[in-house]
Amino acid sequence: MNKPAILGGTPVRDTKLYYGHQYIDETDIRAVVDVLKSDYLTCGPKITELEEKLCKLTGAKYAVVCSNGTAALHMACMAAGVEAGDEVITTPITFAASANCALYCGAKPVFADINDKTYNIDPAKVKEVTTDKTKAVVAVDFTGQSVELDELMAHCKENNLVLIEDGAHVIGTKYKGQPNGSIADMTTFSFHPVKTVTGGEGGAVMTNNEEYYQKLLLARSHGITRDTALMEEEPHGGWYYEQVSLGYNYRMTDMQAGLLISQLDKLPMFSQRRKEIVAKYNEAFSQMPEIQVQEEIPQSDTTRHLYILRIKPEMLKINRREFFDAMAAENIMCNVHYIPTYYFPHYQRLGYEKGICPKAEKLYDEMMSLPLYYGMTDQDAEDVIAAVKKIVDYYKK
């Protein structure tokens, strides 16, 4: 039997393969250089160009780009009117920002458990934890697979809630043939380097609602406007502007926007390559009884941001941490997405306790994220599969 590298065997590859990596080509570099040579480094024409491109891509009426995905979530909560005394429902299997955005507004995050096959928030559990204090639902498209939007939108409409789709992973995905970003009340995007397209950092909020759009614009730029229709005084002159609400400096730079405009041109090829690698993984791992493959709902034509390997510990002699370390010894550098948000000390101090979402907690104990990005070669993917098979074969009961 082939001995794992962690026990002194030979690794499946000589160089480290990381779970995510951006792809930047000469077109992207020229796009940024062109901005650097232009008159505007921020608050310039590239912002509008990017927003128009995102609207065309998704079919949404309005886009407001911003500094990062966390800012996008905060802005969406502000536009939704989330405030002290409100509750906001989200999933624990997400980056902390999906819940922190409620805290920023003085509201209380409420965690709903996941579907243990798709790993997305379970609409039935959302219904269970909805109260008369619930103001919004932040539904995360985990790994890039769309949440069950029909069910969630029906529930939100029935209970007068705002549906904020946390689409940090979802760009490129379609739900029932329609691009995600044009369906929920608001959808947020993230453009961090490990995402499918990147601006270095960056985010956006998409909506079809003009009232939300106007509030998002104010939230992004200090609550300041030059729109005379929103002013309370007559303008003092051509220089005049007013702060009409309390907002933040959540603006994106034109360098980031220029990079993103170029990156979005490559989204179809990024999406296709990710789908090819996912298909390779699914085919290989579906033949290993010790591995559970993430299920996909038929409504979601998914551009996968993450690939989750879920082990069945009852069929192996090692746990997730030992499997993770064994993969690293093979030079396959995995990650874990995510630690349940309410496990963190800050949330524990707020009174949250383990046990709230048992399916999410079980998933956390059994999963890791495998390498998945556009620049991976077929051999890279084969190395990942070989490492998983090697470890499973050695440690299976």
Image (cartoon, rainbow, N blue to C red):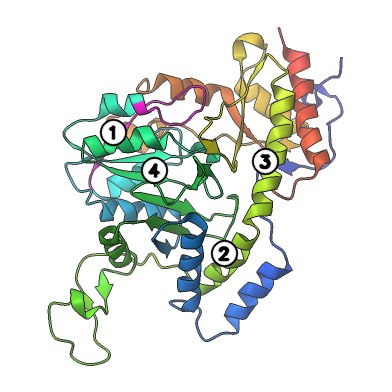
Can you tell which quarter of the image residue 278 is in?
A: top right
Residue ID for mark 3: 275
**Residue 192 coordinates in the image, percent (x, y):** 54, 54
Q: Kindly report which numbered mark, 1 or 4, lies closer to the viewer in this rendering.
A: 1
- Disc 2 or 4, which lies upstream in sequence? 4
Question: In the image, is residue 133 part of the stretch drawn in magenta?
Answer: no
State how far apart marks 1 and 3 are (Cα).
31 Å
**Distance CA(mark 3)–CA(mark 4):** 26 Å
- Residue 197 located left or right of residue 397: left
Q: Is residue 262 left or right of residue 387?
A: left
Give the vertical position of 390 relative to 276 (above or below). above
What amino acid does circle 4 point to? Ser
Q: Position of residue 376 (x, y in %)?
A: 75, 46
Q: Which residues are magenta?
A: 106-123
Indicate which disc residue 98 carries.
4
**Within 10 angstroms of label 2, few (less than 14), some, or many (20 or more) residues?**
many
Q: Main secondary structure of the magenta part?
A: loop
| Residue displayed at 44% across by 58% down | 204
Where does label 1 land, which residue? 155
Q: Nearer the viewer, mark 2 or mark 4?
A: 2
Question: Which amino acid type corresponds to the residue marked 1 in the rendered image?
Answer: His
| Residue 298 location (% of width, % of height) | 53, 31
Residue 81 vs residue 42, the one in the foreground: 81
